[in-house]
Image (cartoon, grey):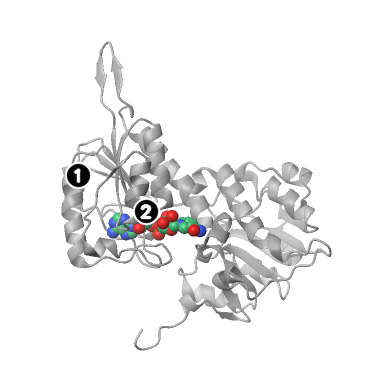
């Protein structure tokens, strides 16, 4: 029988890597789930609820980690927790592979095998394990709901005896998973929604959600998607044309939600100070790229900036503000990833090292950071 441990997250992190549902499922597969007391509290999964689902509650992180064959976490665990693990233990978390490299090397030095869920290959088989999607979807929803609550006007058009209330104009920049959900949420709330992206595939998606697509559709735009489905960094010339188009559109918007990201790079700057100054006082920008530097020049990550009455929110970890859903979906992503490696008969855990998803997410092994994306670049690359 294998032991799966879950420790409490540090700092402001509200999410947890387990839910009553995944405790039941892992237990059903023959595993024992050991959860640090209080770990689920901020996701409204009390010790009792987790216990009722079949978990064992441990008094401390080191007690839980010390018994673990597999440690599940939301964020990169602390060195203290890593050192408490048994030799040969496996950690599965969002390890922030591009962040704090020295700390990552130190962590690798413990000899633990770690998998980072952010690197889950974006193939059909792995859709149900894709933590970026499960969390971005909730973030896109919450960005619009938060913007609506900050906005001092109504969202839908209302025709009343006292006159007409106009619909809010909402502009979504970046139509990935978060952007698509933001469009859908903006439409549900009655806004007039437009959206932009550099990947041509998004044009049809935007239209199918009933929003207007706005983009510079030149030759570069037609090539802007990588095989993995992500955006490529755009040339300076493209960015200039894009900025001109956005500048004229943004001046008439009430709410702007930005989600534009390029993997492994700082967020592209799409909204300049001058563009913010062209917007009406009372307008709201929610910058979902804040954690990676922001899509707006004036974004203050983790804060709300006020520039001439235009408020720019730079939330970090918006999915964490709907922790009940975020934890439920995240822990289900982990369950789906690990299930094939747990033998239903014997309850043994055996990783298939040839599996594409294992290779894609393996971050550290045998004392080193082993992921190809994190190796020093050789000349000519
Ligand atoms: P992301 O978070 O990396 O980026 C968000 C969006 O920003 C992307 O749509 C990107 O094109 C856009 N962007 C980047 N630079 C921009 C710029 N200068 N101006 C405007 N927009 C810009 O993306 P994501 O949400 O992770 O999704 C990327 C793609 O991967 C989508 O097509 C999604 O459907 C696909 N996907 C596939 C799977 C799967 O098959 N398993 C899972 C999830 C997502």
Q: Residues within 10 Å of mark 2 (few under 14, many from 20)?
A: many
Write the residue at 62% across / 64% down. Answer: 92
Q: Nearer the viewer, residue 229 or 42?
A: 229
Q: Earlier in the sequence, mark 1 or mark 2?
A: 1
Instruction: Give the residue at the far bottom of this rendering.
Output: 379
The alpha-carbon separation of the residues under discs 1 and 2 comes to 25 Å
Q: Is residue 201 left or right of residue 124?
A: left
What residue sits 32% from the left and 33% below the top?
Answer: 191
Looking at this rendering, what residue extends furthest in the top direction?
A: 161
Task: Give the image location of residue 349, x and y in percent.
Answer: 75, 68
Instruction: Tell me the tag on residue 378.
Output: none
Query: Foreground residue, 102 or 51?
Result: 51
Residue 300 image position (x, y, % from top left): 33, 52
Q: Residues within 10 Å of mark 1 (few under 14, many from 20)?
A: some
Confirm whether residue 294 shows in the render. no
Res. 203 visible in picture: yes
Q: Is residue 198 left or right of residue 149?
A: left
Q: Which mark is residue 249?
A: 1
Whether 299 is drawn above or below 160: the answer is below
Seen at 47% across and 77% down, the residue is 374
Up the image or down, 50 lies above or below 335; here it is: above
Q: How many marks?
A: 2
The answer to which quarter of the image holds residue 341 is bottom right
**Secondary-structure class at tag 2:** loop
The quadrant holding residue 7 is bottom right
- Helix, strand, or loop for circle 1? helix
Of marks 1 and 2, the one in the foreground: 1
Is 362 rendered above or below residue 327?
Answer: below
Q: Which residue is mark 2?
A: 301
């Amino acid at each position: 029988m294998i032991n799966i441990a879950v420790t409490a997250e540090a700092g402001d992190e509200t999410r947890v890597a387990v839910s009553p549902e995944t405790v039941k499922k892992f237990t059903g597969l023959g595993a024992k789930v050991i959860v640090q007391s209080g770990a689920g509290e901020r996701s409204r999964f009390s010790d009792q609820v987790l216990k009722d689902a079949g978990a064992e509650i441990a008094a401390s992180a080191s007690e839980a980690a010390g018994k673990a064959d597999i440690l599940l976490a939301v964020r990169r665990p602390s060195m203290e927790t890593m050192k408490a693990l048994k030799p040969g233990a496996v950690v599965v978390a969002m390890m922030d592979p591009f962040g704090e490299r020295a700390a990552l090397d130190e962590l690798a030095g413990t000899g633990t095998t770690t998998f980072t869920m952010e690197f889950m290959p974006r193939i059909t088989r792995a859709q149900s394990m894709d933590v970026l999607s499960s969390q971005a979807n909730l973030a896109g929803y919450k960005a619009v709901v938060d913007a609506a609550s900050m906005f001092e006007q109504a969202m839908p058009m209302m025709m009343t005896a006292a006159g007409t209330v106009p619909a809010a104009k909402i502009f979504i920049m970046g139509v990935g998973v978060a952007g698509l959900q933001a469009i859908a949420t903006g439409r549900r709330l009655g806004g007039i929604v437009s959206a932009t992206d550099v990947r041509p595939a998004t044009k049809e998606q935007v239209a199918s959600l009933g929003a207007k697509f706005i983009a510079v559709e030149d030759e570069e735009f037609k090539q802007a998607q990588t095989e993995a489905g992500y955006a490529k960094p755009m040339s300076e010339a493209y960015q200039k044309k894009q900025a001109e188009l956005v500048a004229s559109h943004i001046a008439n918007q009430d709410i702007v939600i930005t989600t534009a990201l390029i993997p492994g790079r700082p967020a592209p700057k799409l909204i300049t100070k001058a563009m913010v100054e062209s917007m009406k006082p009372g307008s709201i920008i929610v910058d979902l790229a804040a954690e990676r530097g922001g899509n707006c020049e004036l974004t203050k990550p983790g804060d709300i900036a006020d520039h001439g009455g235009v408020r720019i929110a730079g939330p970090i970890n918006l999915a964490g503000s709907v922790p009940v859903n975020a934890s439920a979906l995240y822990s289900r992503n982990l369950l789906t990833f690990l299930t094939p490696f747990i033998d239903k008969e014997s309850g043994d855990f055996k990783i298939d090292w040839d599996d594409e998803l294992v290779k894609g997410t393996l971050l550290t092994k045998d004392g080193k950071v082993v992921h190809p994306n994190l190796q020093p670049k050789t000349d000519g690359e």
